[in-house]
Image: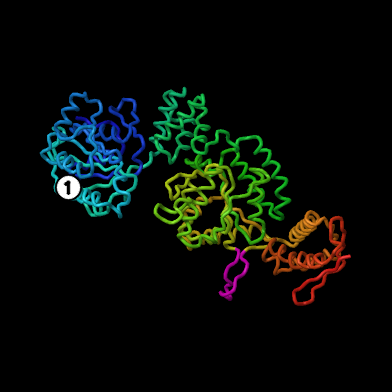
Amino acid sequence: MNAPAAVPHFVRELCATLPVHSQFVLYGNIRDSFLVRRTPDSVPLLLPMIPTLWEALRVHGYECLVVYDPVDRLLGVQAFGVDPETVSKIENDLLPDVKPSDRLSLADLEPVLRNVTRPQAPRRAAVVIDYASRIAASPDRMRQEERAFFRFAEKLSQVTGARPGPPSRPELLFNPIIWLVEGERDLPAALVVGNDRIRPISVPLPGLEQRTEVAVLEAARLGLSGPDVEESPEIRYFADQTDGMTLRAVREVAVLARDGGHDHSGLPDAIRVYKFGIESNPWRSDHVRRLIIAGEQGIPEKVLGQPEAVTKTMDILKRAALGLSGAQAASAATRPRGILFFAGPTGVGKTELAKAISKVLFGAASEPLRFDMSEFAAEHSADRLIGAPPGYVGYEAGGELTGAVRRDPFRVVLFDEIEKADPRILDKFLQILEDGRLTDGQGRTTYFSECVLVFTSNLGVLVPDPDNPGRLIENGDREDYRVHERKLREAIEEHFEKVLKRPELLNRFGDNIIVFRYISEEVAGQIFDLMLTTIVSRVREVLGVEILVPDDVRALLLKWCTRPERLLKGGRGIGTALESCFVNPLARALFPRGDAGPGARFTVTDVRDDGSGTVSLELR
């Protein structure tokens, strides 16, 4: 007998080790469909797990599969393509005391397993225990019947013997028991750990080759065929976009395309519907393009003194809108739309720019989904991002990150001060940055392929003083941007490679590291004016009171708010100083006045510092 020309690797591994293992545990992607070719030139079949096992085992002389479903407690013989009369004879030989309608308990199943797997069994057969993960609610907390059954299965794996194989394979082969489970630890450890008669075999998600083969099959139903169809852009895109999906899901995407009345050109929209429930692609709309063009004019007015950072950010957004992010990579289709790593001193506009691009892309009311990574300094805090695993507190709630992105997949996600997170949490970002997806604690896949991810960091801004290691000094250059950019990039690279020991994460950011300048005196004055105007406008909106600030008072406030120690904290330092030097004394002056009502108009005539840090002002 000749083996099928093509069966999945996990089935070939099972068949190859039949002489030495009496039981097998297949775990992982067991509910998928699998590609099988009966002959090298035949059209591939897409079969569920049990028919796939049959296609492989039958060519090694196996006459049937004895399948037990512990959910329904039903047992039956399956031999696909075999006439009913022969199947009936096999049932009588192997299961003389069992009728198809009988509901078997675990205790009832034991003599059946013993009879089928013994060397003197009347037929060459394999037992498949489907839904084996559901036999026990928990492998650590089993009922007496369940413990007794698994003890029996453990002993049976050791004492049962093999029987002669077919003429094409005369070596002794077992009549094996094949357990189908979702997770590797779904069966009791006492059964599988250290038991060399039981072989665990992982059933992986399909690779690019398998997804391409199914894409070709489905595309033919949508009107796309030909000798070079595998190399067509539509097939390559379809196979890339379905990365991380099962072959059954790949077929279901094609079903959505047909249901929508589309030909092969509708596959991208069908993928989007399957992943996100949204058919239209906001990124490809003229509206987004107009917003990006308008943003090029408006953002520099909000993020002051950062021309290089704003220009490079807008370039990346244009690339994202065109779908060209990571275009040089084979897996570009599934990566996030945009990846930005904002580096530079505190208070220079990194977070402000992230907010600005969120409003540019998704409307004035849009705010980034923001995570302060200083809150994730402990390894266990990763549960907040992706959800706790089963059995742990908070499992039902899911992850803050994965849940929010599933609810709205078209958004900007901001990870503030990324260097403060536990390094093992940073590993979660490897899969997001490379594959554009993440599996949460409940086993659900979240896709990030329509997100813009923004990371901010203060890495490299301050370094130990060579002459006084206990003191930190500025590492960048306030005058020469190129020198400043080079120094910060070098410090970031050193941190990822030598401190975190994760150069692969740095590689995922690539050339998307955007370095922000220090705040210059000129820009500090512009920020001061913008904040002062905002304060005056706020007083007008909330109280209906007009506040006039003469030039001499403005100049004095500017001097106080832009002192060198204030500028070390960038725009935040200026804002904090304005609050202390202007907002607080203004509130003190307005609060007791009975005439500070709507329509009132006051001029700040003087501001004074009493030397203790308390500032007062006079209104007229």
Residue 133: image location, x then y, percent: 31, 45
Residue 276: image location, x then y, percent: 52, 39
Residue 555: image location, x then y, percent: 82, 65
Res. 258 visible in picture? yes
In which image quadrant can residue 12 be found? top left
Instruction: Answer left or right for 296 relative to 179.
Output: right
In which image quadrant can residue 170 be found? top left
- As rendered, which of 382 and 506 lies closer to the eye? 382
**Secondary structure under the numbered disc 1 in the rendered image:** helix
In which image quadrant can residue 13 be found? top left
Q: Quadrant of the C terminus?
A: bottom right
Task: Provide the residue span drawn in magenta.
Answer: 461-475
User: Please, which residue is most extreme toward the bottom here?
Assistant: 611
Q: Specify few, some or many for label 1: CA neighbours under 10 Å numbering under 14, 14-19, or 20 or more.
A: many
The image shows a total of numbered marks equal to: 1
Residue 61: image location, x then y, percent: 18, 32
Above or below residue 532? Residue 33 is above
Residue at 14 percent across and 45 percent down: it is: 160
Q: Which residue is mark 1?
A: 156
Mark 1: amino acid: Leu
Res. 550 visible in picture? no
Residue at 52 percent across and 44 percent down: it is: 406
